[in-house]
Image: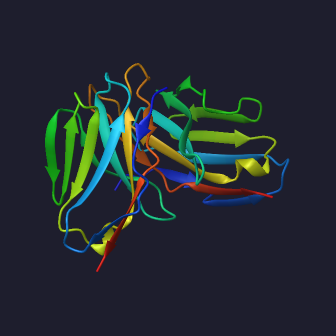
Amino acid sequence: DARVTQTPRHKVTEMGQEVTMRCQPILGHNTVFWYRQTMMQGLELLAYFRNRAPLDDSGMPKDRFSAEMPDATLATLKIQPSEPRDSAVYFCASGLVLGSSYEQYFGPGTRLTVT
Amino acid sequence: QKEVEQNSGPLSVPEGAIASLNCTYSDRGSQSFFWYRQYSGKSPELIMSIYSNGDKEDGRFTAQLNKASQYVSLLIRDSQPSDSATYLCAVRFSGGYNKLIFGAGTRLAVHP
């Protein structure tokens, strides 16, 4: 049963600290997405990659967020420095774009609390 | 502004009834449509995808798409308490590098 995995599942940190979240997409998927979910804003797309190349990061605060995909099995999202308003659940999703068929599968999420 | 609109609910239905969840979208060129179910504290789970006008059935779930009206719906037959969750509509907008735009979700409550 192929699944997207994310680490850590929970993270509590102090304002100003660096936070790194990791994601392992489903093997064979060619797109990876980072989302943030809050009660107020719902599910927001932060960044996404196709074949490891960043295609769109317009949803990310550029001054503090960065997303990379160093290899096909690992995607990272970093926040430096973190702020209380970054507290949210961060989801990674992966998908296989094949013709008109297109589906995304979500990981379990990282619940981030910045105090 | 590309938008996906859903009634936030809660939509309350009795066990065994049909739950009908609706979604409208702003981009007439959209081609792919998805329904995700999200239990409280969990991640969204893909339950249906639909690409062509008409109905698509999978077990107790039926997705309906009307591109002319820019409307997609999800019917859940024989609703069970375990169906109580938030249902997110997602649309792949044209020209968007395959990214999905999600609605805010409709909270469904199925009561015994």
Q: Quadrant of the C terminus of chain A?
A: bottom right
Q: Residue at x 14, y 38 (%)?
A: B54
- Where is residue A100? Give x, y as percent: 26, 27
Q: Quadrant of the N terminus of chain A?
A: bottom left
- From the viewer's perspective, tell me whether residue B40 is left or right of residue B51: right
Q: Residue furthest top?
A: B95
State the count of labels. 0
Q: Is residue A113 shown above or below B111? A: above
Task: Using the image as rendered, state which of residue A89 and residue B29 is in the foreground.
Answer: B29
- Where is residue B64? Give x, y as percent: 20, 43
- Where is residue A67? Give x, y as percent: 64, 34
Q: Residue furthest bottom?
A: B112
- Where is residue A11? Give x, y as percent: 70, 59
- From the viewer's perspective, tell me whether residue A93 is left or right of residue B50: right
Q: Residue at x 18, y 68 (%)?
A: B78
Q: Residue furthest right?
A: A16
* Occupied quadrant, residue B99: top left
The scheme the figure's colours follow is rainbow
Q: Is residue B55 shown above or below A71? A: below
Q: Residue at x 50, y 35 (%)?
A: A72
Q: Is residue B14 shown above or below B68? A: below
Task: Using the image as rendered, state which of residue A3 and residue B45 is in the foreground.
Answer: B45
